[in-house]
């Protein structure tokens, strides 16, 4: 296991250095996007419309943050990760079309996303669920909020972060998927137990 400190925009070369179980911290610009923001960005892309932010080399955080406004500034109060399987429907296209290098969330993602990460050079960084305040502490300021009409949790929050993490690389550019490996191991162990019990 190696610890990497990455600064956005992250190059494909740097993303391809990362391996499953490595730890990463990110400094620079990241943005939040859940179902609705993914869907709108891909619709804009299909229609040839510009999206409000160049996503190349950035990290997308599956998160519906709690945000408050103080004077004229937005402040992130809590920023816990959303379960990433909700975005599995969109993520392969999102990686292909926008060249994001790190996908941050919890719970992992499936085969299509893993294949896209291998092909286009991106990784999945697992963030601990229940650590929403820790995540918020790494946010230095909100650079902008895009598509606020989608509502607070679904809007695209553009964040300036410092040493955002720790994130565990759970899917790498070699097609390794920590969540799939654990699932297979559990299934194999379960089958052995069933055989011993003659079930």
Image: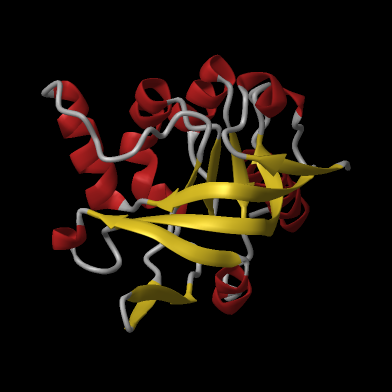
Which residue lies at the image location 63% right of the left edge and 74% below the top edge? Answer: 134
Which residue lies at the image location 38% right of the left edge and 27% below the top edge? Answer: 98
Left or right: 3, with 147 as reference point: right
Which image quarter: residue 140? Answer: bottom right
Q: Nearer the viewer, residue 151 or 19?
A: 151
Looking at the image, is 19 positioned above or below residue 24? above
Left or right: 126, with 52 as reference point: right
**Quadrant in the picture for the N terminus:** top right
Which residue lies at the image location 66% right of the left edge and 41% below the top edge? Answer: 7
Instruction: Give x and y (percent) for residue 64.
Output: 37, 65
Question: What colour scheme governs how the chains and residues are painted in the rendered image of this protein?
Answer: secondary structure
Which residue lies at the image location 71% right of the left edge and 41% below the top edge? Answer: 6
Asked if residue 106 shows in the view, the reply is no
Left or right: 12, with 110 as reference point: right
Residue at the farthest bottom position: 70
Q: Nearer the viewer, residue 171 or 74?
A: 74
Residue at the farthest top position: 119
Instruction: Give x and y (percent) for residue 4.
Output: 80, 42
Residue at the farthest front position: 72
Instruction: Give x and y (percent) for residue 33.
Output: 36, 51
**Quadrant in the picture for the C terminus:** bottom right
Looking at the image, is 147 positioned above or below residue 152? above
Which image quarter: residue 39? Answer: top left
Looking at the image, is 79 positioned above or below residue 110? below
In the rendered picture of this protein, how many numbered marks are placed on residues? 0
Instruction: Give x and y (percent) for residue 61.
Output: 47, 52
Asked if residue 173 shows in the view, the reply is yes
Q: Nearer the viewer, residue 130 or 14?
A: 14
């Amino acid at each position: 296991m190696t610890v990497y400190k990455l600064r956005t925009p992250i190059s494909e070369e740097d993303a391809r250095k990362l391996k499953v179980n490595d730890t990463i911290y990110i400094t620079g610009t990241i943005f939040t996007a859940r179902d609705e923001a993914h869907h709108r960005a891909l619709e804009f892309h299909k229609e040839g419309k510009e999206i409000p932010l160049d996503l190349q080399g950035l990290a997308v955080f599956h998160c519906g943050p709690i945000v408050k406004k103080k004077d004229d500034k937005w402040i992130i109060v809590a920023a816990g990760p959303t379960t990433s399987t909700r975005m599995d429907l969109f993520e392969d296209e999102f990686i292909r079309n926008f060249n994001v290098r790190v996908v941050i969330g919890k719970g992992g993602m499936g085969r299509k996303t893993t294949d896209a990460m291998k092909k286009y050079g991106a990784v999945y960084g697992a963030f601990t669920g229940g650590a929403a305040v820790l995540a918020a502490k790494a946010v230095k300021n909100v650079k902008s909020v895009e598509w606020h009409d989608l509502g607070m949790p679904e809007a695209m929050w553009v964040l300036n972060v410092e040493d955002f993490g720790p994130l565990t690389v759970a899917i790498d550019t070699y097609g390794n998927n920590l969540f799939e490996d654990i699932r297979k191991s559990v299934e194999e162990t379960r089958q052995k137990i069933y055989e011993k019990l003659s079930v």
